Image (cartoon, rainbow, N blue to C red):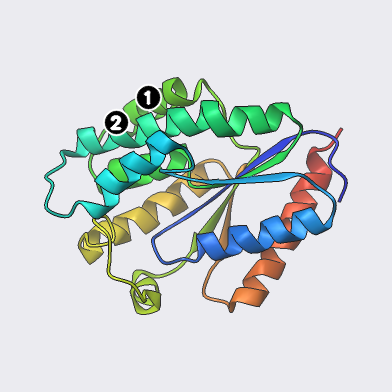
Amino acid sequence: MESKKPMFWVMEGGDGAGKSTQIRLLAEFLREKGLAVTVCREPGSTKLGEEIRDILLNRASLTIHRMSELLLFMAARAQVTNEVIRPALARGEVVLADRFVLSSIVYQGYAGGLDIEQLRAIGHIATGGLEPDGTLILDLSVAAAKARRNTPPDRLESEADSFHERVRRGFLSEAARNPDKIHVISAEQPVEMLQQTIRHLTEAIWASSQP
C-alpha cells in the first residue's frame, strides 16, 4: 500500500463495538507498510479535548442538556481538527480517528432527538468543512455490546437500551444515505477476522481513491 496523498479515515459504531482495538491494529498494519499514521479519539487527543471528555463521560452526577452535550462534543472536535488532524494531513500522513461528526449526528440526533440537519451544519462549522475520505462503521447488536463490556459504563454507555438501539439504527441509516463513503462491517466476528475485513476494505478503497 503506497500513500500518494494524505488520507483521513474515521471508525464509528456503538459503544462496545471494538473501535479502539481495531484502530490500534489498523495503525500497526499501516505503519508496517511504511506509512506515517496519526491516531486520535473523540472527544480527546488534545488537552482541551481530554478535559471535555472527562465532563461528558465521567461526571455521572452532572446534568447536561442534550444541546449542551452536543456543543461540548463540537468544541472538542474543533480543537482536535485544528490541533491534530489538519496538521497531520498537511504533513502527508494517514489519520485514523475514533469518531467524528457522524457520532454527533447519531448520538445527539437520531438517539437524542436534536435536529439532524442542524447538527450537520454545526459539524461543518466545527470542522471547517473537513470530511473523512472514508468511514467504517462497526455494527454490533446492543445485547452483544453490553455483554462485551468489562468496565463500569460511562455516562453515555449508561443510557437505556432503547437509546442505544436508536444509535445503531442511526448509523445504519446514515450508511444507507451515503454508501460510497460510509461502510458497515459486522463486528460480531472475532477480533482477528474483523481486522482482516477492515484491512481488505481499506486497501480496496485506498486503491480506488489514489490518482
Q: Where 33 falls versus 81 (above or below)?
A: below
Q: Are marks 2 and 1 in contact (CB under 8 Å)?
A: yes
Q: Where 73 falls versus 60 (above or below)?
A: above
Q: Where 116 falls versus 162 (above or below)?
A: above
Q: Which residue is mark 2?
A: 71
In the image, 7 versus 143, the foreground residue is 7
**Relative horizontal placement of residue 41, taking residue 72 as reference (left or right):** right
Instruction: Specify few, some or many for label 2: CA neighbours under 10 Å numbering under 14, 14-19, or 20 or more.
Output: some
Q: Position of residue 80 (x, y in %)?
A: 49, 33
Which mark's residue is nearer the viewer, 2 or 1? 2
Q: Quadrant of residue 105?
A: top left
- Name the residue rendered at 88%, 45% in the picture: 2
Badge 2 marks a residue whose secondary structure is helix
Q: CA distance from mark 2 to mark 1?
A: 9 Å
Q: Position of residue 38 (x, y in %)?
A: 65, 44
Q: Which residue is mark 1?
A: 122
**Relative horizontal placement of residue 37, taking residue 204 as reference (left or right):** left
Q: Is residue 65 visible?
A: yes
- Name the residue rendered at 46%, 53% in the picture: 172
Q: Amino acid at mark 2?
A: Leu
Q: Position of residue 71 (x, y in %)?
A: 29, 31
Q: Amino acid at mark 1?
A: Ile
In the image, 23 versus 160, the foreground residue is 23
Q: Position of residue 67 (x, y in %)?
A: 22, 33
- Name the residue rendered at 66%, 68% in the picture: 195
**Relative horizontal placement of residue 200, taking residue 57 as reference (left or right):** right
Q: Where 9 falls versus 58 (above or below)?
A: above
Q: Quadrant of residue 27?
A: bottom right
